[in-house]
């Protein structure tokens, strides 16, 4: 039985869920993954990160009757005019693996000079008090980097092994979780959310 301050994490991505939970663990929130309530993944048919995050949060709210927080994120490559963007998780097609998507991105950038391989991770966090919430809390953050020619590092997920952060002089996959969450798109967006009035504005 959920407690009165339970918030649903609207994600079916286990690695993303783990990262979200780790970052929010320091804040006083009772988070429960949507899988605990047998909530299936929402159909993400929005055209922006914001739309998809709202779709996921509303879906979880509707099926559980509880407040929900959703993340929609991806990587934008300037040379590719912002691709893969909202299609980052399915760049190589539906049900593509992280490795499939990463390989396709490397293929698209084959032979492209390092100076043109600038990119950024984008993250949108949406919090909805209930399915009909007219004023969801929306937090956005980005993380600038460069796409490498090959993979370095074993950590993280998604495009982390080829996303190089010049300030840190390492890829996202080389960072320990605490280091990554301090500077990443998701870490910054979640911290904005945690500092918002999400809990005090919940629908209790």
Image (spheres, helix red, strand yellow):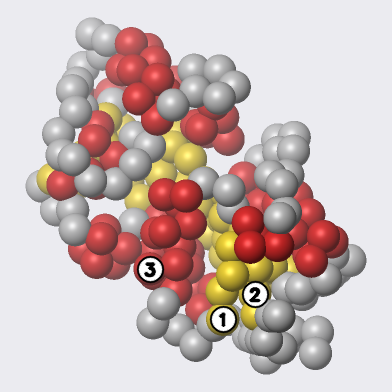
Foreground residue among 19 and 143 = 19
Asked if marks 3 and 1 touch (Cβ < 8 Å), the reply is: no
- Helix, strand or loop for disc 3: helix
Task: Give me the C-alpha separation between circle 3 and circle 1.
Answer: 13 Å
Identify the residue under disc 2: 7
x then y, percent, for residue 165:
21, 46
Task: Determine crowd level at label 3: few under 14, some 14-19, many 20+ residues with C-alpha closer than 10 A.
Answer: some
Q: Determine the image quadrant of residue 139.
A: bottom right
Task: Give me the C-alpha separation between circle 2 and circle 3.
Answer: 15 Å
x then y, percent, for residue 80:
44, 20
Is residue 150 found left or right of 62 in the rendered image? left
Viewport quadrant of the C terminus: bottom right
Is residue 46 found left or right of 72 in the rendered image? right
Q: Determine the image quadrant of residue 5.
A: bottom right
Residue at 83% across, 71% down? 65
Foreground residue among 39 and 44 = 39
- Helix, strand or loop for disc 1: strand
Which numbered tag is attached to residue 87? none
Foreground residue among 137 and 45 = 45
Is residue 109 found left or right of 48 in the rendered image? left
Viewport quadrant of the N terminus: bottom right
In the orientation shown, which residue stands out farthest toward the right? Answer: 132
**Taking the image as drawn, is residue 204 in sight?**
yes
197 over 52 or under it: above or below: below
Identify the residue under disc 1: 30
146 over 64 or under it: above or below: above
Is residue 142 found left or right of 175 in the rendered image? right
Q: Earlier in the sequence, mark 2 or mark 1?
A: 2
Identify the residue under disc 3: 22
């Amino acid at each position: 039985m959920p407690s009165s301050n339970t918030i649903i994490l609207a994600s079916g991505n286990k690695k993303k869920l783990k990262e979200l939970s780790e970052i929010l663990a320091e804040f006083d929130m009772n988070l429960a993954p949507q899988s605990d309530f047998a909530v299936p993944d929402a159909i993400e048919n929005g055209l922006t990160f914001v739309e998809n995050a709202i779709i996921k949060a509303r879906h979880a709210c509707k099926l559980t009757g509880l407040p929900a927080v959703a993340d929609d994120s991806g990587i934008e490559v300037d040379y590719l005019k912002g691709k893969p963007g909202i299609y980052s998780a399915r760049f190589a097609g539906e049900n593509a693996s992280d490795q499939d998507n990463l390989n396709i991105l490397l293929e698209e950038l084959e032979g492209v000079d390092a100076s043109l391989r600038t990119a950024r991770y984008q993250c949108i966090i949406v919090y909805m008090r209930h399915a009909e919430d007219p004023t969801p809390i929306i937090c956005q953050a980005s993380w600038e980097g460069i796409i490498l020619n090959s993979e370095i590092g074993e950590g993280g997920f998604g495009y982390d092994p080829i996303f190089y952060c010049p300030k840190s002089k390492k890829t996202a996959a080389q960072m320990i979780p605490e280091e990554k969450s301090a500077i990443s798109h998701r870490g910054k967006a979640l911290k904005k959310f945690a500092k918002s009035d999400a809990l005090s504005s919940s629908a209790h």
